Amino acid sequence: MLNMMSRNEQSVQVIELRGATRVFPGPGRGFVALDRVDLRVAAGELVAIVGASGSGKSTLLNLIAGIDRPTGGEVRVAGTAVHTLDESRLAAWRGRHVGVVFQFFQLLPTLTVIENVMLPMDFCGTRPPAQARRHALGLLDQVGIADQADKLPSALSGGQQQRAAIARALANDPPLIVADEPTGNLDSATASRVVELLAGLARAGRTVLMVTHERDLARVVDRTVTLVDGKVVSDA
C-alpha cells in the first residue's frame, strides 16, 4: 500500500509560480513559450496540464522540475526557490524532490529494471546498496511488476516499462511527480491503468502534475489547467 501523508502535509502548497516566463532566443523579442504564468498546486493534488502543441505545456513542466530555468518570475517547489539555484544545487535538489516520468520511459537499456529504479538512490546517496535494492523491490511491487525486477527493459511491454519508470520516479520519496505525456506511447487500456496509478499516488498524498493531450480525465484529476500560447486560460 502507498504510504499515506498527514492531513497537515496535504494542505501545503507544493508548487507556486509567480509571473513565470520563459523566452527562447529568436528574431525580435524571441519566442515566448511561457508568458507570466501564476499557478499554485497543493500537496495531494493530481493536475492535468492540457493544450495544443506549442502551447507551453512541456516548458511549464520543465520549469517546475528544474530541468529548465525561467527568464522571468519565480518558481517555488517544495519550499525551495528553484529559480535561484545554481546548476550543482539544482541537480541535487531535483534528485531528492522531483520524480520525472517521460513519455518514452527513458530506462537505461543495459541495466535491469531494479537497477534502473535503484539508480536515483545511488546518484543522490539516499540509501546504501542493500537498502536501496529492498526499497526498489518494494516500489516495483507497488506498481505491480516486482516479478520483472531482474529483466532488461526490452523484455517488458510498454505498460510495464512505464510502471518501472514510475517506480524509478518514486525512488527518493519525492513530494512531487511530474509526468510528460506518460500515456502518449500506450494503448488506451494500458494508458488508463497508468493514469489510475498516478491518481493513486495523489490519493496517497503526493502532488502529481501530468502533461497530456487526453482531455477526458475529469473522472480522475482534481484540476485541469489549459494553456494557450504560453498563458493559462482555464484552471477548472
Image: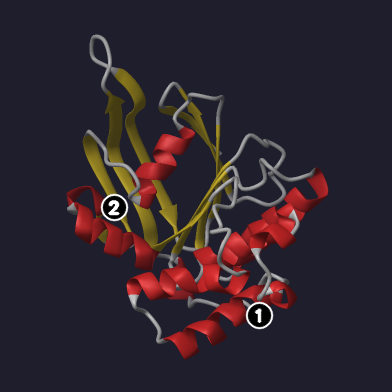
Q: Is label 2 in a helix, a strand or a loop?
A: strand
Q: Are marks 2 and 1 in contact (CB under 8 Å)?
A: no
Compared across the picture, whether 31 is left or right of 166 comes to left
- Give the residue drawn at x 32%, y 44%: 17
Q: Position of residue 184 (x, y in %)?
A: 66, 40
The residue beneath circle 1 is: 1
Q: Nearer the viewer, residue 31 or 73?
A: 31
The residue beneath circle 2 is: 76
Answer with the quarter of the image where residue 80 lies: bottom left
The answer to whether residue 205 is seen in the rendering is: no
Q: Position of residue 161 (x, y in %)?
A: 67, 58
Q: Which mark is residue 89?
A: none
Q: Position of residue 142 (x, y in %)?
A: 66, 75
Answer with the quarter of the image where residue 193 lies: bottom right
Q: Is label 1 in a helix, a strand or a loop?
A: loop
86 vs 70: above or below? below
Residue at mark 2 to residue at mark 1: CA–CA distance: 30 Å
The three-letter amino acid code for the residue at tag 1 is Met
- Give the residue drawn at x 73%, y 55%: 159
The answer to whether residue 223 is seen in the rendering is: yes
98 vs 146: above or below? above
The three-letter amino acid code for the residue at tag 2 is Arg
- Give the residue drawn at x 30%, y 31%: 22
Q: Position of residue 26 (x, y in %)?
A: 28, 16
